[in-house]
Image: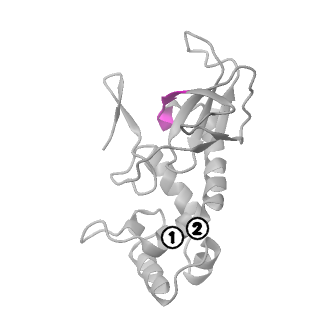
Amino acid sequence: MRIGMEEYAVVIDSLPYGKSTDVRREPIAQIVGEDYFTLLEVTPKLGIILAVGDRIYIGKGPRDKVDHIKSRISYFDLTSSARAELERALKRIIMEKEPYFVSFFNKCGPINIRLHQLELLPGVGKKHMKDILEEREKKPFEGLADMNKRVALLPDASKIISDRILEELTGKSKYYILTRPPFQKEEGQFNAQG
């Protein structure tokens, strides 16, 4: 499980007039964090229009485009446009942070005596896990393309990562290896898992 504060995020939807269901209509944007894939709603500074695909600073220091973080949201709070854009944003983040994900494949280990972190990845079963472990023992992977080349019949590594992140964001997973555990709605309130 990964926990920490996001520094940068990618805008996946911009609502200049807010949501139609909001009592107080103000501009908001739905974003995904680059480090922990946290889903958030932010309010831009007065006069700033955030566009889909923009990379914005949301850390603790002075922010140039974001006035404040409105709230952490779940995957199911995303607009349909944000859901459609999320996969594209994830692919972009994965390619920009490729060394982190290559390191994950080179260093990940077992969760318990029966389950390895690699087996949690969509499309990776016992056979692919064994192949990945054997290949990384010979020589650590240098990139995702290197991994795709060296592990026979493995689905595209960036797609595997993206699919796993989406699975974790929707709350369909028991283990959170790439994201922060999502909020779960219980009795009308948000509670963080973990």
What SS does tag 1 mark? helix
Q: Distance of mark 2 from mark 1, alpha carbons?
A: 6 Å
Number of disc labels: 2
Q: Where does the magenta region start and end?
A: 69-76
- What residue is shown with label 2? 99
* Figure quadrant of the C terminus: top left
Left or right placement of residue 184 versus residue 144 in this view: left
Residue under the image location 38 percent in, 66 percent down: 117
Q: Quadrant of residue 188?
A: top left
Q: Amino acid at mark 1?
A: Ser
Residue under the image location 43 percent in, 81 percent down: 133
Left or right placement of residue 165 versus residue 175 in this view: right
Spot occupied by residue 46 in the image (x, y as percentages of width and height): 71, 19
Contact between labelled residues 1 and 2, with CB atoms less than 8 Å apart: yes
Spot occupied by residue 120 in the image (x, y as percentages of width and height): 40, 62
Residue under the image location 69 percent in, 33 percent down: 64
Q: Amino acid at mark 2?
A: Pro
Q: Residue furthest left?
A: 113
Residue under the image location 64 percent in, 74 percent down: 145
Closer to the camera in the image, 84 or 15: 15
- What residue is shown with label 1? 103
